[in-house]
Image: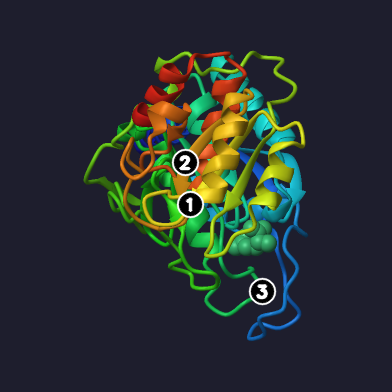
Amino acid sequence: MNKKFLNKIIICHIFLLLSVSLAAVAMPKISVLATGGTIAGSGASSTGSAYKAAVSPVEKVIAAVPELSNIAKISGEQICNISSQDMKVEYWLKLAARINQLFRLGLADGVVITHGTDTMEETAYFLNLTVAYDKPVILTGSMRPGSALSADGAMNLYNAVAVAAAPNSINKGVMVVMNDRVYSARGVKKCDTINPAAFSDQENGPIGRVNYGKVSFNARPDKRHTYQSALKLGIFTASLPEVAIIYGYAGINSEIVEAICNTGIKGLVYAGVGNGNPSEEVLAVLAKASENGLTVVRASRVPGGPVTLDAEVDDTKYGFIVSDSLTPQKSRILLMLALQKNLAKPAIQQLFFDY
Ligand code: DGL
């Protein structure tokens, strides 16, 4: 083989090595923070509905999708390994602190959180209010365990990493990626108990799609997220004020509501009927509780539409806050964070309109 030809082969090899290493250097660093859920679950049969969530560690969840390494430089951490009906404020605080630290130290260009679907919308909204950076934070999970036929977890995780790695995912707040759709944290809800297409945003629809890792956004989230506001958490925030939710219904016993108001809670979200309406007896109990210092938010059990100020209820007279288009469970999150800031009622009400 002549010398010239040999040199050409060597140059080609050097070029190939360079381009592979440059591609690796250029790939975004995505940190996968695992919390459990069905995406880490397993069942005995591929066609049976019985399974156990939160059994696989983060390493196994990532290893199940080797294609991730084609689109990002992946690192994995286990925050907890629970079914998300067991999610708690302490895990939210741990997640928010770790995400802010990863971004502050430049250790990640984006974060993907694998999570059970039951409370995914709550964790997403909590982080939307407490992550102090505009880098992508994406939550994903699955409705079927990896052991099931047509399991959805692997593609959901691949698509979530693709969104976290996409340059135009910056400054869109925390997002949820499920079933090829991208949702904003404020509007997303789990709307079906068992179907892989369980999530939707009835008010605004999805803000984008991701199809085999190809990301396209059709709208910006309609609300700012908190890297621009005063709701940031202190680095060592250890707990949050207790806020309860009561679901309204025909014939509700106002003594039960009164008992809950007197348990030492700092805030109450009343998920009323219609436009957030309490019965006359419950209204009297809430008015007295509000006068005694409890912060009361009127939300609604109705899945769509906002709760509006001073409609059938004179909120101004009673000092009530209305939830706007936030669900009861998200109203609780915003109120917990607002109450730790000792804000006046009008300032708290503005937060419900803005966030
Ligand atoms: N126990 C439920 C949870 O962890 C399983 C549902 C799921 O993750 O899809 O939220």
Q: Which quadrant is the N terminus positioned in?
A: top left
Residue at 71% across / 32% down in the picture? Answer: 265
**Amino acid type shown at disc 1:** Gly
Position of 321 compared to 286: left or right?
left
The residue tagged with tag 3: helix, strand or loop?
A: loop
Nearer to us: label 3 or label 2 = 2
**Mark 3 lies on residue:** 147
**Mark 2 lies on residue:** 298
Give the answer, above or below, for where 185 lies relative to 98: below
Residue 112's image quarter? Answer: top right
Residue 338's image quarter? Answer: top right
Q: Which mark is residue 272?
A: 1
Which class describes the residues within 10 Å of circle 3: few (<14), some (14-19), or many (20+)? some
Q: Which mark is residue 13?
A: none
Label 2 lies in ligand 1 vicinity (Cβ under 8 Å): no
Q: Is residue 73 visible?
A: no
Q: Observer-nearest residue: 186 or 283?
A: 283
Mark positioned earlier in the residue sequence (1 or 2)? 1
Real-space CA distance between mark 3 and mark 1, rounded to the nearest whole angstrom: 40 Å
